[in-house]
Amino acid sequence: MTELIVGLAGNPNVGKTTVFNRLTGMRQHVGNWPGKTVERAEGHFKHGSYEYDVIDLPGNYALSAHSMEEIVSRDFIVDDDSDVIINVVDAANLERNLYLTVQMMELGANMVMALNMNDFAKKKDHIIDIPLMSELLGFPVIEISAKDGDGFEELLTTVEKQASNPIDSSAKLSYGDELKEHLGDLQSLIEKDSNLLDVPSVWTAIKLLERDSIVIEKVQKSSQSSAIMAEADKVAGHLHDLYDAGAEEVVANARYAYINGLMAEAVKRPDVEKETTTDKIDRIVTNRFLAPFIFIFVMFLLFHLTFTIATPFCDFIDEWFAWFGEYLAGAVGNEILGSFLQDGIIGGVGGVIVFLPQIILMFLFLSILEDSGYLARAAFTLDKVMHSIVGLHGKAFIPMILGFGCGVPAVMATRTMENESDRLLSMMLIPFMSCTARLPIYSIFIGAFFVANKSIILLSIYLLGIVVALIVAGILKRTMFKGMSAPFVMELPTYKVPSLKGVLLHTWEKTKGFLRKAGTIILGSAIIIWILSSVPFGVEYGSQESVLGMIGSAIAPVFAPLGFSTWQAGIAILTGLVAKEVVVSTFTTLGGLEEDDEEGTIALVHDLFTPLSAYSFMAFCLLYVPCFAAIGAIKQETNSWRWPLIMCAITLVTAYIVAFLIYNVGMLAGFG
Ligand code: GDP
Ligand code: MG
């Protein structure tokens, strides 16, 4: 006989006592938990070669330190007295019941879920995909009827299997990138003290944020106490700044986001009874047919607002830099030094800084989309498309959308993906997502050729990136990255009006990165481009006879089939390898900043391209090899040069093919 200690846990009124009575019959006794005034019901029975000891845990909704019942229940789970926890759940009120479930998952409890009250769920027309739910949660879910005694045989054999193969139920729990990142810092401190590791470190971290008095007391005895408490305060403060809410609320929201995602994936409910505002919005926003249109509309709005609001500011900065460059050149007197300042520094760096308003707005709107909860929905809806066409999990879409901001954090965000091969694949796709560094390129070309339809053209470029990424993903998934990805819950946070402070903080964090780049990489490249445009001495600045012109002329023929064979285009693509802003600063160093569009860079671009070749050039810039920083990020994340090199090859070939198609099909269609 093997002895099995099993705890029954669940909300009140889910049928726990009915299950308990059915299992133990008359062989039960009721007493108190040692030293506590909390009732303890315990019973024994035999099943096969197992001798069960079942404890009915005090019914509750949470595992905080607020009530004695909750403390008794969680101590029972933590102290490892039990082999398996049976989580009895009311299928007709799944959402509310899961709140306790996720808290037991935080504890890593070795769990089996007994899904009860299925007759009520059926009456309400709730259809639960039990195998999927079990896969998403990472532990077995068994349908039972406590009242009629159905499903108990399966429940017990599953419990026995689970007892000999314990699982860590915290493994599949996910609370979103932001929280994960901050919890991670706290967890690594907690993990330094083995005395704290009787429970998953994630649990201790969460409880510290919730200011759980018992956990705080325990941590205070640790050798790492001061470091851990300081970090917990820091994280709580930071979360407060971001969300304008206490850490406890942020954690609760993260749990509900996980539950929402799980419900949306595994449970079908009739629309009528969904009553929360989030549900109402979601009925439209995640509607299978409307969702893609809403996504495109939101994107369009994003670009349209970015452009219309930013343009006057950009123009103002542009005029100011033009005046300042002129003034500086005049003031220094020396011709070479003057050109260095005016064309090299002001032209190169200023030419990119001009787009700062657009970049800030883009980051600002992306932060609003992210913080309001829409971005998660976009990824969720695209999950279905991605899964069926591409065979890639929708979770891959979150790093991809973050790629609209910058590829470097996007590559790091792939860490949340479970499956290694999926993670690599999404890294290969991120470079196709148009990052803010490419925005200035489009601005220049749209300014020169497509002023009348600027938002549409910009939207089309971004969509082109997504479509190409999906096609490439489809091809790679069938060749290099075979195999289906494991299902995984995507968190769906409730919609909320983002806090101003949180949005500004996110925006500033990202803008800072851009400014740093302007002061280093872009400045350095601008200086090199200026030097190469000025040597050999005596040559006309920025002419084809300069070294820059010669290099450009040498590579230009390669791009002739794509519609742009000028040396300036060639050199811009070459220098753009460093960072995409440098494509623009190459043109602005050559063309100069002028207050009037009839002269300067816009005019230069106008001379070098036709509308069709301009579009082909934009598409090439969108798709070809990303900047050094993004390549470096992939190298760092994969710890080898193999994947960054493969990515460079894939993007280069794709860019060439797509630009070739655009130009040549366009020519045939008469757009030449
Ligand atoms: P506890 O509070 O979790 O211990 O829940 P109880 O075991 O006391 O059950 C609450 C009520 O639900 C009782 O009246 C049970 O008879 C009823 N009940 C339990 N299981 C089922 C079920 O599967 N279907 C239905 N319709 N009622 C059930
Ligand atoms: Mg009861």
Image (tube, helix red, strand yellow):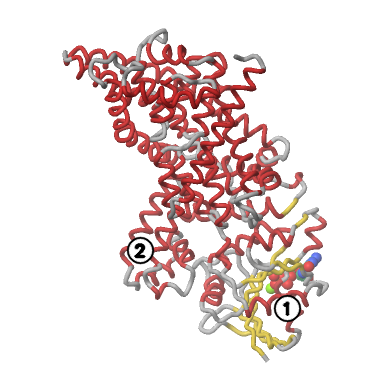
Q: Is mark 1 on a helix, strand or loop?
A: helix
Please give the residue where the numbered disc 2 appears in the rendered image.
Answer: 228
Q: Is mark 2 on a helix, strand or loop?
A: helix
Ligand 1 visible in quadrant: bottom right
Residue 216 image label: none
Between residue 537 and residue 518, name the one nearer to us. 537
Please give the residue where the numbered disc 1 appears in the rendered image.
Answer: 157
Tell me what residue is drawn at x 49 percent, y 51 percent.
Answer: 177
Q: Residue 373 lies in what quarter of the image?
A: top right
Q: Tell me the quarter of the image containing the N terminus.
A: bottom right
Mark 1 residue type: Thr
Query: Does the beta carbon at disc 1 come under 8 Å from ligand 1?
Result: no
Between residue 282 and residue 385, name the one nearer to us. 385
Which percent across, then down, holds residue 49?
72, 89
Mark 2 residue type: Ile
Which percent across, then down, holds residue 515?
34, 34
Q: In the visual, does 537 lie left or right of 557?
A: left
Nearest-to-viewer mark from 1 and 2:
1
Q: In the visual, does 534 lie left or right of 385?
A: left
